Structure formats: C-alpha cells, structure tokens
Amino acid sequence: MKTIIKNEHAQAGVGTLIIFIAMVLVAAVAAAVLIQTSGVMQSKSTSTTKEAAAAIGENFAIEAVDGYMSTAGTSPVNYLNVTIKVAAGGSDIDLTKVLVKVNSQSYNFTSDTNISTVPLNTFWVYSLREATTGATDISNSGANKYAKTSSSTLKPGGLARFDVNVTSLTIGARSSITLALTPEKGATLNLPLTIPALGSTNSVAIYP
C-alpha cells in the first residue's frame, strides 16, 4: 500500500493564484482600453459619416432660371434670376457663403441694396418665401418688391432668388452657358443652360 504524503505548504497553489490574478488584471486593462478605443472610433465614424454625406450631397435645388434684358427682346441678357430652395434632406444654407459661377466668371454675395452701386462680379439675394409664417429666416432691407438681404439663412421650406449681373458675358439667344452654385457645405450644383429666343419682352424663361 502506497503512503499518501501530506503537503501543507501549497507552494504550487499560491503561484497559480498569482498567475491567475495577473491574467485577470491584464484582461481587465485590455478590456478597458478596447472599450475606450471603440467609443472614440464610433464617435469619429459618426462625425465622418455626417461630414461625408454633407460633402457629396447637393444642398440646393434650382426651381427656375429666368433671364432679364434691360431693353426688351434685345441681347445681351443682363441678369440671371435664379430661384432656389433647400434640396430634399438638405440643411440650412448660409447664402452669404455661396459662390455663384456662370461659365468661367465667379460671383460673390453682396448686401448692397442700390443696384447702381453694386460691385462687379457680385450677386444679391431676394427672399421669396420664408420657411415659417411670420419668420425672418432671411433678414430684409431695401424697398423692392422682394427686398434684398443683408444676412441670409435659407431653411427647408423657404424660397430665395439670386440676381446675377451677367452683362459682361454678352449672353444672347441660343448661347450655351453653365450655372454652378457652390454652398459652404455640400457639393457644387452644375446646371447646363441654353438661352431660348428672347421674344419681345424684358424677361425670358430659361429653366425649366
């Protein structure tokens, strides 16, 4: 019969326990690092997704483009009147930050309310319809039918109009032009246009 040796020191058990505790601590630290990293990555991915969607999505929708001639039925077209709204799913647009381009000519916003003193290569904005009844999404000034704006935020549901002086481009009947609108955030909206016969009035419908 074998004799059972009783060992009360338990040295192997203490060593195993120490290793086990060390493994638990390492696992806890690793888990904490992973949780923190995943939280940061999720926040960044959400932000990046929103920025990417805003960058590639068109924030503008062009409702109409009309041409205006100072002399009825006579070239060139002096002004382009561009009616715009916020596109479906779009967000508020600061119209003072929009860049308008007709062919190779760029135009920037002006708050000048006197047409005779409006700087060259600028455009101004009219508030056609506010997004909310009684709201002043676009601040108005001036005494015109559609008052010019001094500061502008176009909200979903609102309607605004750009007036662009294109006299220097000498745009006549059957001319082909490209209108481009670039907001502060969002993709550039390009619209190829062909000027129709001018008729006998001061205005002509170009688009749609």
Image: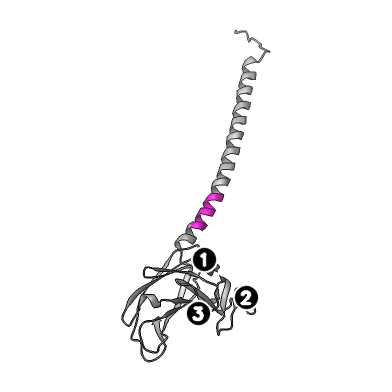
Indicate the position of residue 93 as horizontal and vertical percent values.
53, 68
Question: What is the secondary structure assignment of the residue under circle 2?
Answer: loop
Q: Quadrant of residue 148?
A: bottom right
Name the residue furthest front: 117
Spatial CA span between label 2 and label 1: 18 Å
Question: What is the secondary structure assignment of the residue under circle 1?
Answer: helix
Spatial CA span between label 3 and label 2: 26 Å
Indicate the position of residue 94 as horizontal and vertical percent values.
54, 67
Near mark 3 (Cα within 10 A), the count class, few <14, some 14-19 or many ≥20, is few
Residue type highlighted by circle 2: Thr
Name the residue furthest bottom: 200
Residue type highlighted by circle 1: Lys
| Magenta region, residue range | 43-51
Question: Which label belongs to residue 136?
Answer: 2
Indicate the position of residue 196 as horizontal and vertical percent values.
34, 83
Indicate the position of residue 1 as horizontal and vertical percent values.
60, 7
* Foreground tag (3 vs 2): 3
Dot 3 corresponds to which residue?
116
Marks 3/1 in contact by CB < 8 Å: the verdict is no
Residue type highlighted by circle 3: Ser
Residue at horizontal 60 percent and vertical 8 percent from the top: 2
Mark 3 or 2, nearer chain start: 3
Which one is nearer the viewer's eye here, 29 or 2? 29
181, above or below 74, in the image: above
Mark 2 or 1, nearer chain start: 1
Dot 1 corresponds to which residue?
97
Mark 3 or 1, nearer chain start: 1
Residue at horizontal 64 percent and vertical 9 percent from the top: 5
Name the residue furthest left: 174
Quadrant for the C terminus in the image: bottom left
Question: Which label belongs to residue 58?
Answer: none
